[in-house]
Image: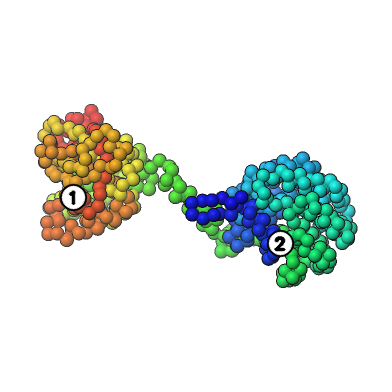
Amino acid sequence: MPVVNQKTIVMSKTSMLRSIVASPSIDFLMETHNGLSARIAEEAGFVGLWASGLAISASLAVRDSNEASWTQVLEVLEFMSDATSVPILLDGDTGYGNFNNMRRLVKKLEQRGIAGVCIEDKLFPKTNSFIRGEHQELADIGEFCGKIKAAKETQADEDFCVVARTEAFIVGMGLAEAVARAEAYRVAGADAILIHSKLADCREIDAFMKEWAGRHPVVIVPTKYYSTPTEHFERLGVSVVIWANQGIRAAVAAMQQTTRQIAADRHLRNVEGEVASVAELFRLCGADELLEAEKRYLPTTGRDVKAIVLAAGQGDLGTLTSDTPKALVTVKGRTILSLLADEFHRVGIRDIAVVRGFGREQVNQEGFAYIDNEQFAETRDLYSLYVARQRIEGDIVVSYGDILIKSYILHDLLADPADISIVVDAEPDQSGTRNRRDLVVTDRPYDRRSDFAKPVQLSRIIEDLPDDQANGEFIGLWKLSPKGAVTVRDALERLHERKDFSGLTVNDLLNEIALVHPISVRFVRGGWIDVDSLDDLQKASAF
Ligand code: SPV
Ligand code: MG
C-alpha cells in the first residue's frame, strides 16, 4: 500500500517488489545476508534484494539446512530491512514447517517490512540444491499448494509477494514435472514461479520457458549457468534474475586474503591500503546522522564549547592587587580564576583560554591556554578580546576573569539557542561601592515567564545608568554559536578600525552588534558575584 508523505507518494516496499515481479522488463535482485551487505547492494543500485538462505546461514557459519532457526533469520532480516529502502525477497526455504508455520512466517515478515517470500517444494529441514540434489525429496504438490494458499490468505498487504520455487529439475524429475508443479503453484495463488537448475548451461531454463509460454512471471537463479548472457534471459522473457550468493562469496574471498596476509606479516602495512577505511564504515552506517541527532536531542554540554576569560586587568582591591592581577586574588584559598574554571569544567568546558596582561607572569596555572595582551596598561577589555580573536569560532563562551558564577548559569546559557546571548541579572545587588556596573536596557522588562515566551533582546548596555532606567546588569558572561562567532569577529574588525579602539569595552562591541543582530538576554537573579571591591570579596567568601 502506498505511503503518502507531505510532498510525494512513496511506494511501499511491497509495491516495489510487486512491480519488479510483474513488470515485463527484466530486473535483478542481489544476494545480501546482513544489514551492511544489504545497504551496500542498495547503494550499488539494485532495485531489490534476495535474502539468501545459503548466504545468511554461511554468514553465521552454519549449514544451509535450517540450522539457523527461523526466528534467528528474522532477526537478520530486521537489520537488513532497517538498513535499506528497497524491497527484500526472503528465501524462506520450505516455509520452516507446514502451512501453519507458513502463516506465522508471513505475518512476521510483514511486521518487519519484508516485501515477499520465496518457498521451495522440498521437505523441512531442507538441503541446499547444489548438495546431492538428486537425492532430495520433493514436497507433495497438494501439501505445497496448501502452503501457498495459506501464505496468500494470511498476508495483510495485497502487494506482499509469494514466489513458489520448484526443485523438479534439481532432483532430476524433468520438464513435465517442473511445468506441472509450476502450473499448480500458479493456480494456488503464487505471484511468480522460481525455476531452479543446477546445470552449467541454461538448457533446462530454455525448455521450461518455452513450455511455460509466459503464463506467469518467472524468476531464475543462474548460479551454475552463470556464463549465459543476460540478454538471453531477457529474450526468454524472464522476469527476475537473482544473483544469489556473490556478495557473501566476495566477502569470504576478501576476508581470507586479508586475514591470511595479516597473520603472515604480523603487521598491517600491506593491507591498510587494500581494505575499506574506517571512515567508510562510519559512512555506511550513517555516523553523521547520529552526530546531527545528538545536537538535537542530547542536553547541551560544553564538550565542544571553548571559553575565553578576559583577565588582563589589575583590578582595584588595594594592596591585594598592587602586584597581583585580580583573577589571582584568592577566595577561601582558591584563586578567582580557578574557581571560575571549576564552574566551566562542571558543564564540560575544558578548553579555556585566559587573556592575561597585568602580572601575566604570575598567571600560569596549568589547564589553561594563555594569550597575552601586551598593551593591557593602555587598553580596555575589548582589546583583550581582540588579541584572542582567533579563538572566536565555533561555540564559545566569553567571561570576565573577575566574576564567580554558579554552574547552573553556564548550563542554561549553553542551552540558549540564540546565536549571541548574554547573561543579565534582573535584580542586581545594588549595595556597596562598585567601580563599574554594566547596566542593561532590554526590549522588554524581565518577567518570570520570559524564559518560555519570545526571547528578550538587548537594546543597549550603558555603564552607570540610573538603576530605575535599567532592566538589569550584564554579569560579564556571554555565549556565541558558530554563526554568532562570525558576527562578533566581523564587528570586532569594524571597531578595530576606529582610532579610539584601545578605549573601547565589550559593552561597546555588544552595542555595535545590537544595531544589526539580535542579542538574546538570559535573565538570572543572583547566582554570581563580580569581585570589584573588598566588600565584594567579603561576599565572595560566603558565595
Ligand atoms: C539461496 O541463495 O539460498 C538459494 C539459491 O536458495 S541456491 O543456493 O542456488 O539454492
Ligand atoms: Mg536457499
Determine the residue located farthest toward the top in the rendered image. 542
Displayed quadrant of residue 411:
top left
For label 2, the residue is 240
Where is residue 460? Give x, y as percent.
17, 46
Looking at the rendered structure, the secondary structure element under dot 1 is: helix
Can residue 307 be seen?
no
Residue 75 at what x, y percent from top left?
Answer: 65, 44
Identify the residue under disc 1.
511
Horizontal arrangement in the rendering, residue 187 relative to residue 496 (left or right): right
Nearer to me, 452 or 190: 190
The mark that comes first in sequence, 1 or 2, is 2
* SS state under label 2: strand
Residue at horizontal 59 percent and vertical 49 percent from the top: 82
The residue carrying mark 2 has its beta carbon less than 8 Å from ligand 1: no
Seen at 83% across and 50% down, the residue is 122
Q: Residue at x 29, y 52 (%)?
A: 484
Q: For the residue carrying disc 1, how many other residues have a C-alpha within 10 Å: few (<14), some (14-19), or many (20+)?
A: some
Which is more toward the observer, 73 or 265?
Answer: 73
The kind of residue on which mark 1 rests is: Asn
Residue for point 70% across, 52% down:
161
Q: Position of residue 50 (x, y in %)?
A: 69, 55
Query: Can the viewer see residue 154?
Result: yes
* Residue neighbourhood size for the residue with mark 2, other residues' Cα within 10 Å, grouped as few (<14), some (14–19), many (≥20): many
**Image quarter of the C terminus:** top left
The answer to which image quadrant residue 406 occupies is top left
Disc 1 residue: CB within 8 Å of ligand 1: no
Label number found at residue 406: none
Which of 487/338 is in front?
Answer: 487
